[in-house]
Image (cartoon, rainbow, N blue to C red):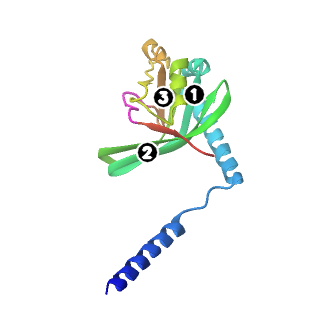
């Protein structure tokens, strides 16, 4: 009787291991990684073009920033429990430094799906080095992020422009204001 239970448990364990192994996907090929990087690069270029059109003062801030982290498409979805996910890249001095992902979870009145673009500008060396030095980075916990406030003429207000980290959020209808990026977790992608 004891042997039968052992064999049953072993069969179930091996079956589950086989199912998990069958569900896992193989690592991406170098060609797939190259295609993913190109897709992200094109999305970043498009996002920065939209940002400059919607907020003329943002171009000067991007040029002054030590690092520019852009997520062209962050998808938010949920029913009660929600989450966000997006992939992007970090640029400094016009060069790509690395690729990153952003993830956020939430509880509460979440219903539906929304896509947005998120841009973080690291304006000081200290803020930029803090971002680079960690295994991950969380807005609000690792650094305060000032969400950009613009005037009617599209210029960035001076309080925002003097912040160590500035965030922009763009939707299909334009720049979003009065929201928090706190809790947004960023980690490096291996592509």
- Compared with 47, 61 (above or below) is above
Local secondary structure at mark 1 = strand
Residue sitting at 45 percent across and 20 percent down?
Answer: 150
Note whether 64 is above or below 78 in the view shown. Answer: above
Most extreme residue toward the front is 2
Precedes in sequence: disc 3 or disc 2: 2
- Where does residue 185 sit, x and y in percent of width and height? 44, 38
Q: Which residue is mark 2?
A: 84
Q: Is residue 2 left or right of residue 33?
A: left
- Crowding at label 3, few (<14), some or many (≥20) Cα neighbours within 10 Å? many
In front: label 1 or label 3: 1
Looking at the rendered image, the quarter that the N terminus falls into is: bottom left
User: Farthest residue in the bottom direction?
Assistant: 1
Residue at coordinates 37% horizontally, 44% vertically from top-left? 105
Question: Residue 110, percent across and down?
Answer: 32, 47
Circle 2 sits in a helix, a strand or a loop, which is it? Answer: strand
Q: In terms of secondary structure, where does tag 3 sit? A: strand
x and y, in percent, of residue 136 in the image: 49, 36
Q: Is residue 96 above or below residue 36?
A: above
Numbered mark located on residue 154 in the image: none
Q: Is residue 190 left or right of residue 157?
A: right
Mark found first going from the N terminus, 1 or 3: 1
Which residue lies under the disc numbered 1?
68
Circle 3 residue: 168
Q: Earlier in the sequence, mark 1 or mark 2?
A: 1
Between 187 and 170, which is closer to the camera in this rendering? 187
Residue 69 on the magenta segment: no
The one nearer the camera, 5 or 181, is 5
The reply to whether the magenta stretch includes residue 179 is yes
Q: Which residues are magenta?
A: 176-183
């Amino acid at each position: 009787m004891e042997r039968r239970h052992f064999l049953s448990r072993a069969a179930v364990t091996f079956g589950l291991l086989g199912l998990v192994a069958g569900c896992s996907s193989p690592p991406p090929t170098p060609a797939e990684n190259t295609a993913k990087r190109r897709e992200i690069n094109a999305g970043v270029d498009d996002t920065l073009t939209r940002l400059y059109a919607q907020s003329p003062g943002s171009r000067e801030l991007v040029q002054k920033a030590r690092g520019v982290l852009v997520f062209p498409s962050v998808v938010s979805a949920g029913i009660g429990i929600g989450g966000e996910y997006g992939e992007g890249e970090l640029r400094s001095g016009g060069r790509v430094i690395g690729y990153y992902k952003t993830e956020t979870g939430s509880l509460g009145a979440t219903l539906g799906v929304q896509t947005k673009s998120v841009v973080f500008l690291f304006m000081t060396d200290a803020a930029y080095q803090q971002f680079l030095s960690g295994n991950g980075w969380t807005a609000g916990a690792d650094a305060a992020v000032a969400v950009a406030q613009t005037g009617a003429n599209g210029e960035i207000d001076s309080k925002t422009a003097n912040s160590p980290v500035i965030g922009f959020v763009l939707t299909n209808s334009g720049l979003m204001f009065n929201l928090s990026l706190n809790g947004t977790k960023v980690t490096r992608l291996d592509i």
